[in-house]
Amino acid sequence: MTVMDMYISDFETRTRPRHKTQEQAAWDIAATVVDPEIPVLSIADLGILRDVEVTETGKVSVTITPTYSGCPAMDAIRDDLKTAFTKEGYTGVDVDLVLSPAWSTDWMTDAGKQKLQEYGIAPPTGMSDAARHAGPIRLTMAVKCPQCASLNTKELTRFGSTSCKALYVCQDCKEPFDYFKVL
């Protein structure tokens, strides 16, 4: 696996042909843009990079979905995408924000979840309601401490440093940490 392959969503990895098309090259450029709130994750790791198209005239259209509809990072991501493509010689770049279907933590790559863990943020565990079959019983899973790997953790507040994270504390090592919520 190459470094760039880590930035490609699971869907793209399964469906893209072995030779690199113009769209795939453009996808790779877009996939270098990092999330301004969690700079160890690319927008592809996070799963918010949905599509990249290149027209015959060389204009690029990028589709992104925010982690939630009021995410303040979208303006910065839009600007960073335009900058990344401009640096690569593209003159026309449109960034479209699409709210439907709503983003889910199921769209995060395994590499992205591993990067969160290494950065000190507990990655989402389990699947979102959208991905699982509805059942009569909903169980809460323990959140593993990214510092000492203990499952003896406690939620302090449902909203942490951003709306998509919750603040937890480890009862063993006593360290607070963010948990990227399953959405």
Image (spheres, rainbow, N blue to C red):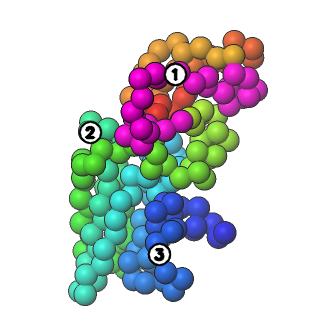
Q: Secondary structure at mark 1?
A: loop
Q: Which mark is residue 16?
A: 3
Q: Is residue 124 magenta?
A: no
Do labels 2 and 3 touch, CB within 8 Å?
A: no
Amino acid type, label 2: Ser
Q: Residue furthest front?
A: 136
What residue is shown with label 2?
69
In which quadrant of the rendered image does the N terminus lie?
bottom right
Is 136 inside the magenta-drawn segment?
yes
Q: Secondary structure at mark 3?
A: loop
Q: Which mark is residue 139?
A: 1
**Quarter occupied by residue 153:** top right
On screen, residue 147 versus residue 99, left or right, reads: right
Along the viewing direction, whichever of 183 and 148 lies nearer the viewer: 183
- Measured Cα–Cα span from mark 1 to mark 3: 36 Å
- Residue depicted at 39% across the width and 52% down the height: 48
Of the two numbered discs 2 and 3 on the same chain, state the one appearing first in sequence: 3
Residue occupying image coordinates x 30% and y 78%: 54
Residue 149: image x %, image y %?
74, 28
Q: The residue tagged with tag 2: helix, strand or loop? A: loop
Residue 12 position within the rendered picture, expressed as x and y whole percent measured from the top left: 46, 67
Using the rendered image of the protein, determine whether residue 32 is visible from the camera's viewpoint. no
Image location (x, y in percent) of residue 21: 43, 84
Rendered view: 169 above or below 30: above
Residue 168 coordinates in the image, percent (x, y): 57, 19
Identified by mark 3, the residue type is: Arg
Q: Residues within 10 Å of mark 1 (few under 14, many from 20)?
A: few
Marks 1 and 2 sit apart, C-alpha to C-alpha, by 27 Å
Q: Is residue 173 above or below residue 25?
A: above
Give the main secondary structure of the magenta stretch.
Answer: loop
Q: Amino acid at mark 1?
A: Leu
